[in-house]
Amino acid sequence: MTTSLLPVVGGDLRVPLVTGGTVPYANLDIAASAPALGSVAERVTQFLPYYSSVHRGAGHASAVSTTAHETARRSVGDFVGARPDDVVQLVRHTTDAFNLLATAVPGEVVTLDVEHHANLLPWAGPGRRTVTARPTLAATLAALDAELARRPAALLAVTGASNVTGEVLPLAALVEIAHRNGARIAVDGAQLVPHRRVDLTALDVDYLAFSGHKLYAPYGAGALVGRPDWLAAAPPYLAGGGAVRSVTLDDVAWADTPARHEAGTPNVVGAVALAAACEALASLSETTQVRHEADLRDRLRDGLAALPGVRLLRLWDDETDVLGLATFVVDGHPADLVAQFLSAEHGVGVRHGRFCAHPLLARLTGGAPAVRASVGLGTSSADVDRLLDGLRQLLTTGPRWTYDADHLPVPD
Ligand code: PMP
């Protein structure tokens, strides 16, 4: 029996069933957005009285807001082992981080074709070179190496872990390949950072992007952490107040990073929350967290694999570390109806669709939507069992209710 490891906001939520009554919500959609930790909510509540003009006012609350914002920035950098001269850009999310980095890269970018759209679309254009993932991870690494050796690139941009299959990529090997070929490396940490510790200094990773809302903090706060020079030379990501040293009607002297790319009033509450989440995870033993999630993952994946007609999606044949998630298709049952059934009759929340990774889904399912269940700090084995029991019912007696695919548009 695995119980929740840390309290999360909404951990006691009850949801209505279409068949009548309510049940505790089994939130198996952690990989999309994780519920805030209780300690994150407390930190936000403590901060709210100081809600005031940040970086601009002389009042006490304003000074506290400014300090809270800059302390949060340091805390976020510390959590990912930032080097002393790294810049910590506070952004909205991973998508924002890569769009910012895309304005700063002085050359071509190599990616894999299995990336989330956030790490594909910002590089779109003649400067993007996409390597097709091979059937094994080893062959995929060799293909990346060959592509970087064939023609120099400024950046290798890869995910740390797939949001579809949960497979974790070997960062040390990727860093070695990039650097040996004269490229820098940017890691999409949206899925990895909430579940495995990533140390930029130890790994020599150049850039890391991640999102607060997947890291047990609220939406709208994320980070791009990494080498300062390209970002210092790039044009400001947003033009406006806060990003300048001086302005005349004819000229602007732009500020240095991080202010250079953070024009406008920043999301201080989000930064405070993100820092609180980073600190909560840093104070939790990684071994304890990984064991908790691995127990739930094994229960989930083994349970799914034992169900006839359920196929788990996987990219590589080699043994890799896998995060606490499982994406699957059920023979004869479209993903949208499976997700709707699990919610309506069992109170289980999952994600369905193509996971903002259309090229990857095209390879794995021919483009058909799939269902993803994912676990985290607030998940218990009872949540996983409810999903498995629900699917067993679907495959034996079938749903009790009639579902209408038109009422549940397939998300992106
Ligand atoms: N990369 C990966 C691997 C993700 O899972 C996600 C979120 N689904 C993103 C990038 C984008 O994150 P966000 O929507 O927070 O920008």
Image (cartoon, helix red, strand yellow):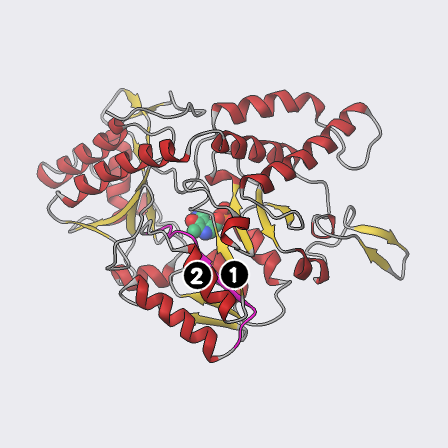
Q: Which mark is residue 252?
A: none
| Label 1 packing within 10 angstroms: few (<14), some (14-19), many (20+) | many
Percent across and percent down for residue 101 are 60, 59
Q: Which residue is pictured at 60% across the width and 21% down the height? A: 45
Cβ–Cβ below 8 Å for labels 1 and 2? yes
Percent across and percent down for residue 80 are 54, 43
Query: Quadrant of the rendered structure where residue 143 is?
Result: bottom left
Residue 192 sits above or below residue 397 on the image: below
Circle nearer the N terminus (1, 2): 2
Q: Which residue is pictured at 47% across the width and 27% down the height? A: 37
Instruction: Decide if residue 133 is in sight here.
Output: no
Residue position for label 2 = 174
- Magenta residues, as a range? 152-164
Instruction: Decide if residue 307 is in sight here.
Output: yes
Residue position for label 1 = 185
Q: Secondary structure at mark 2?
A: helix
The answer to whether residue 278 is left or right of residue 383 is right
